[in-house]
Amino acid sequence: MGNTLEVLETRRSSRKYLAKPVPEDVIEQILKAGTYAATGNGKQSPVIIAVTNPEMVKRMSKLNAAVMGTDNDPFYGAPAVLVVLADRSVRTHVYDGSLVLGNLMNAAWDLGVSSCWIHRAKEVFDSPEGKRILADLGIEGDYEGIGNLIIGYDDGGKRPAAPRKENYVYWIR
């Protein structure tokens, strides 16, 4: 099975990042993995916004923090964010976007890049400022923010997996 299980067993979310940017060619590989996520009826309802501009990353972090009612950086200093949105008219849009985020996280880890799924994309992109960002990008339609994936190089070290809970899997044989 190649190294798929190793990636799945060792990937951890990171909440501490180096200031070092992720090279664009690496981000492109991560994005490609996201585009190959399974989607309901193959409708490909999600879109991904790759944000590497430091000022826009800060702006989006502030919008996210405002939803939480804090001044803290919910993006933990990560140099880039991949925002996943999905077309609300597709009934599987939340699941579709979640699968995209999973592919992005696992591909990033496989390429030596850390990540963390940050919520509140829905609230940010339902706001007037979030809708303005979409309009400025030429994204039309009724898109729901599914999640923000912050990416960068970890500055916190490798952590072991928590033990798997009992009764995680039930068999019917």
Image (cartoon, rainbow, N blue to C red):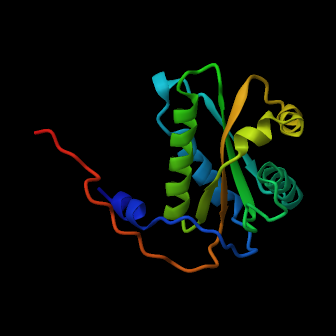
Of residues 96 and 67, which is closer to you in this image? 67
Q: How many marks?
A: 0
Q: Is residue 140 above or below residue 76?
A: above
Q: Choose between 165 and 115: the one closer to the eye.
A: 165
Picture quarter with the N terminus: bottom left
Name the residue furthest left: 173
- Above or below: residue 4 compared with residue 32: below
- Residue 16 position, x and y percent, is 67, 73
For the C terminus, the image quarter is top left
Q: Residue at x 51, y 48 (%)?
A: 103
Of all residues, the one furthest to the top in this rendering is 89
Residue furthest to the front: 69
| Image: 157 above or below 165 | below
Give the x, y percent position of residue 117.
61, 54
Q: Position of residue 113 (x, y in %)?
A: 59, 66
110 horizontally vs 48: left or right:
left
Q: Find residue 81 and report its image quarter.
A: bottom right
Q: Is residue 136 left or right of residue 9?
A: right
Q: Residue at x 86, y 39 (%)?
A: 133
Left or right of 42: which side holds 130? right
Front in this rendered view, residue 16 or 153:
16
170 over 142 or under it: above or below: below
Q: Residue at x 70, y 64 (%)?
A: 23
Q: Position of residue 162 (x, y in %)?
A: 40, 69
Q: Residue at x 41, y 70 (%)?
A: 161
